[in-house]
Image (cartoon, rainbow, N blue to C red):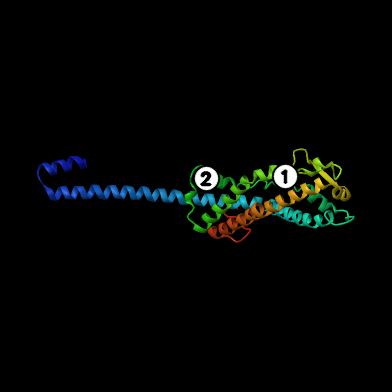
Amino acid sequence: MILRRVMEHVRTQNWVAVGIDFFIVVVGVFMGLQLGNWNDERRDRDEEQEFLIALHREILAGRDVYEEKLAARTASHEAMQIAIDAIYSEGDGRELTDQECLAIAGTSILVLGESSLPSIDRLQANNRLSIISDDLLATRIATLQQSLVTADDRNFTRQSAVNLSSKYPEAITTTPYVEDAPAQVDGTELRLRFQCDVAAMQASPAFRNDLAWNIDLYDSFMRDVVQPYSRSIDGVHEALDAALGVEPGEHAGADG
């Protein structure tokens, strides 16, 4: 209809009317584009809010497990440092405590554990991370993602660690046992109990060399993987609380 009217005005050389017609067309196109942009922006903000709430819930849901694992890792790292004094000391070393023995046996376990957050994974898979409008939160999520990349890059480190109880059974004895675990399907969990023989450890240069290698790998794992991830997840949590306007520990969303 507009085109027919423009052609008619051109045919009659009504240039003022032609100018008005073009102005109407340009304004219409502009308003259409602007309305589309407004709709896209509103959709992005709605999607962002849903993402923030979902991510906040995921972090809160996994917080206790994450903090428990971090505390266990830190305690194990400290126990290793105490145990090596007994193992590498001159003369007869003292016996290791159960915690120290467990720490030495676990020097080859360099696994961060379940660390991904499904909400972030979904946004990343759909190339939608750009909807995050909060600069601080976007930066901290990027830092968290980089810490996970670093953890993946350290797979070669994990593969080079030595399973001391398997290679040196005379130094570390392993005994399986069953304990209650309500989270498991049958309500029980098979675990391992370790017993360390410090004299056998001291008598084996190969054991002490492999232990030194594992300790160095574990120290690197704590420094370059566990601690950066811990700082990153805490940073994301803090930025999320601020973005959502909730107090630490509170759930976001009407039904939280």
Of all residues, the one furthest to the right in this rendering is 92
- Name which quarter of the figure residue 188 lies in: top right
Rendered image: mark on residue 129: none
Horizontal arrangement in the rendering, residue 127 relative to residue 177 (left or right): left
Alpha carbon separation for disc pair 1 and 2: 32 Å
Q: In this orientation, which residue lies closer to the viewer: 240 or 127? A: 127
Q: Where is residue 177 in the image (x, y as percent from the top left)?
A: 84, 41
Horizontal arrangement in the rendering, residue 46 relative to residue 171 (left or right): left
Residue in view at x 29 percent, y 50 percent: 30
Q: How crowded is mark 1: few (under 14 residues within 10 Å), some or many (20 or more)?
A: many
Q: Where is residue 182 in the image (x, y as percent from the top left)?
A: 76, 44
Q: Name the residue under label 2.
A: 124
Q: In this orientation, which residue lies closer to the viewer: 136 or 105? A: 105
Residue type, mark 2 in image = Gln
Residue type, mark 1 in image = Ala
Horizontal arrangement in the rendering, residue 155 relative to residue 75 (left or right): left
Q: Mark 1 points at which residue?
A: 161
Residue in view at x 85 percent, y 48 percent: 201
Residue in view at x 56 percent, y 58 percent: 239
Q: Position of residue 86 (x, y in %)?
A: 84, 56
Q: For residue 169, say whether it is visible.
A: yes
How many numbered marks, from 0 up? 2
